[in-house]
Image: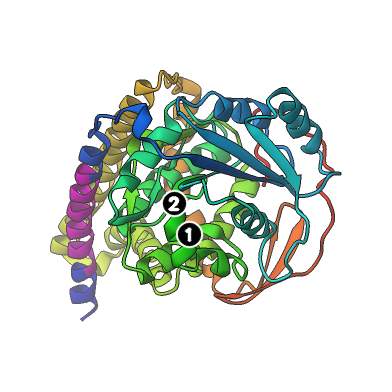
Amino acid sequence: MLKLVLAGILAWIVLYSIVQLCIVIRFVRVLQRVPERPQKSSFPKAAIILAIRGPDPFLERNIRALLAQDYPEYTIFIVVDHVEDSAWPIVDRIRRERPSLVQVSSLKAPLATCSLKCSALVQAVTELDASYEVVAFVDGDTFAHQTWLGDLVEPLADTRFGASTGNRWYIPRDGGLGSMTRYFWNAGAVVQIWLNGFVWPGSMAIRRDVLKDTGIVSAWRNSLFDGPAVVRQIRRAGYKVCFVPSAMIVNRERISLEDFSAWVERQAVVARSLGSDWYILALHAINIVACVLVPPLALALEWSGRNIQSWAYLAAAAYWCVTLLSMLALERAVRRVLNLDEIETGWFSWSKALTALPSLILVHFVVLRAFVCSTWRRTISWRGIEYEIGGRDEVQMLNYSPFRRAMTEPDESVV
């Protein structure tokens, strides 16, 4: 009986590897599509909303990139957590330089029932005047290329889509375990976000009528994370999410393994707030760990027999060959998209290659640990603020103080 179960698991690993390869091939084809952009005059008036708590490493550079968008009519609305926030001087200096393009405000009344970011988004959206037909959302660590806004807005002319989204792609500055493990984690996450029709809020646009009619703003008032609330509400209204390859964003920040482990655990909490989709992602995490552990275990068990061991070799070869081929295909395809925006992508080196293999193995266990810990986690820390999670729409901010930490080095993450 045990041999039969073991053989079944090994056969499943082979099948799973084939399915994963087919999914990656489909995604690579999506990345290869480069639609023609419409004339500038056809774009609607747009608002870009940026919520800030603390100065991200490249914050000033990223805001200035938003000022350089190749888009006919738009305004940047920045909501800083507090006037005493260490990011305020940076933002205020830019506002004084470009007052017609940048509007800055502090968070007036932080809600105790959601995250500070969701409070800031609620404030910014509710204060917009009716002339803005589309709203784009961006994070402080997002470096938007010149056509980023137009690339996100263009698909929203199709009323089937309620939101459009890009994603991030990490190009590690160092070869540390944390940075390289995050690189491999993100490669898998990008595919999962596209496959499941999720959004990445750091590069996202929503039509104004969708924001108004679907109850997204109301959902944010009781949400820890903005992305899952958007997905739930637009699905209920019958809209789809459009993935925009050219809206993918490069992130060059580095991170320690300890900080990445805490960060990916928070991402697992994000996944949990998706509702039933969380179980799919959790099973996926368990599955990929089984792909790593079961084949060598089968080889180590003397009683498994020659046939089982042959299946173990086949399963291990299938999984790791597909994983490596997928990473190469994804890196090559994303690099082509990034090159369209003249972004330097020649980042890999021999020093990083030394940590690539252990990081590729390690990421499986980091992800599983994150999902296990997230199942009973009831509090979470996000940029110095503690939140208590009672359920999907039950969030309580436990403490508040302005973010006064000094700006981090340009190659460090603010978590």
**What scheme was used to colour the molecule?**
rainbow
Mark 1–mark 2 Cα distance, whole angstroms, equals: 7 Å
Reply yes or no: does residue 25 show up in magenta.
Answer: yes
- The numbered mark at residue 206 is 2
Reply yes or no: does residue 3 show up in magenta.
Answer: no
- Residue 60, x across and y down, in percent: 67, 28
- Is any atom of residue 57 visible in this view? yes
Residues marked 1 and 2 touching at CB (< 8 Å): yes
- Residue 352, x across and y down, in percent: 49, 27
Which residue is found at the position 84% from the left and 56% from the top? Answer: 401
Taking 131 as reference, is 125 above or below it?
Answer: below
Q: Give the range drawn in magenta.
A: 9-26
- The numbered mark at residue 281 is none
Of the pair 340 and 96, the residue shown nearer to us: 96
- The numbered mark at residue 211 is 1
Of the pair 413 and 352, the residue shown nearer to us: 413
Which residue is found at the position 39% from the left and 40% from the top? Answer: 152
* Helix, strand or loop at mark 2: strand
- Residue 207, x across and y down, in percent: 42, 52
Mark toward the start of the polypeptide (1 vs 2): 2
